Image (cartoon, coloured by chain):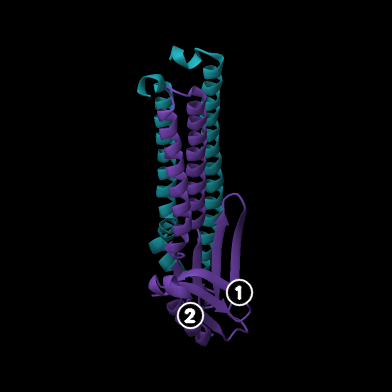
Chain colours: A purple, B cyan
Amino acid sequence: MPATGATGEELLAVVHEHWIKYAAPFFVGLILLMISVALFVLAGISAHHAMWLSHTSFVTGLLLLLATNHWFFAMLLSENSARIIITNKRVIHLRTRLFIHEEMKEITFEKMRFVDAKMHGLLQVLFRYGTVWFENGASLTYVPHPNRMVKQIQQAMGMK
Amino acid sequence: MDALFATPGMTAVTVVVGLTELLSAAMLLFIIRLFLRVRHSQENLLLMLQRHLRNPALDRLLGEVTVRRFLAPNRKLLWMYVLSTVIITILSMLLFTFQPHLL
């Protein structure tokens, strides 16, 4: 049941962005992890024959492993805090990048009659995510089940 | 342990590894502090929005539980981050300290 406030604004849904946004950083992280493990192995193999190569490999591997760990979790913490809040009057998109910026995008339905969902490519159709486009040119990416969200927004526009 | 400072080269590498670990710990604390600040502001924003949207009766019933639920996954991620950094630090230090025996 939607909750109504004193202003007549109703909360319809709170949506997380689609998990697919983690896929590319995850694979990059995995590759960097494999490279750092390879450097540790190289450090082990070369320990008796070339001490300096072993030390350089070890320090480089350690730096790469720690940098990957910090970057990966900073990315996860940033991306995980993104929310799409839908009410009968507006859509609020909360987004945070830990080192870069905090963003709150607000799209009000006033004077707006058109909203559209687009799913491009096999991945988007297969995993059911896409982009929601608004009449004023604003858009929301990585929206799970965008058609469902558009239907909700269209109903909200009709409720005005 | 003496092997770590046996030669000037080995001493230099030991210092570099130690500084790297310290830098990593500082980075962890910095990211946690940054994240907690962001989470606090987001929590305030969501609470404000919740007060704006919900009627008082429902608010009394749900309280801040809804907002906490919004942010719950982040807390788990934060602990995973701390744990992975600590594990990497301990394992790499052990590997480096006992390197002459292991390799």
* x then y, percent, for residue B79: 41, 43
* Distance Cα–Cα, label 2 vs label 1: 14 Å
* x then y, percent, for residue A18: 44, 65
Residue A101, placed above or below residue B91: below
- Image marks 2 and 1: residues in contact by CB distance under 8 Å: no
Q: How crowded is mark 2: few (under 14 residues within 10 Å), some or many (20 or more)?
A: some
* x then y, percent, for residue A102: 60, 57
Q: Which of the numbered marks, if any, corresponds to residue A138?
A: 1
Q: Is residue A137 rendered to the left or right of residue A72?
A: right
Q: Considering depth in this image, is A155 or B45 the residue closer to the camera?
A: A155
Q: Is residue A40 rendered to the left or right of residue B48?
A: left
Question: Which image quarter is the N terminus of chain A in?
Answer: bottom left
- The residue under the point 55% across, 69% down is A92
Where disc 1 sits, the SS reads loop
Q: Considering depth in this image, is B23 or B39 the residue closer to the camera?
A: B23
In this orientation, does residue A3 appear?
Answer: no
As drawn, the residue found furthest toward the left would be: B102
Q: Considering depth in this image, is A110 or A48 the residue closer to the camera?
A: A48
Residue B4, placed above or below residue A10: above
As drawn, the residue found furthest toward the front would be: A49
Q: Residues within 10 Å of mark 1 (few under 14, many from 20)?
A: few
Question: Which image quarter is the C terminus of chain A in?
Answer: bottom right
Residue under label 2: A150
Chain letter for the residue marked with disc 2 in the picture:
A
* x then y, percent, for residue B87: 40, 35
Residue A31, placed above or below residue A116: above
Residue B12, placed above or below residue A73: above
- The residue under the point 48% across, 73% down is A130
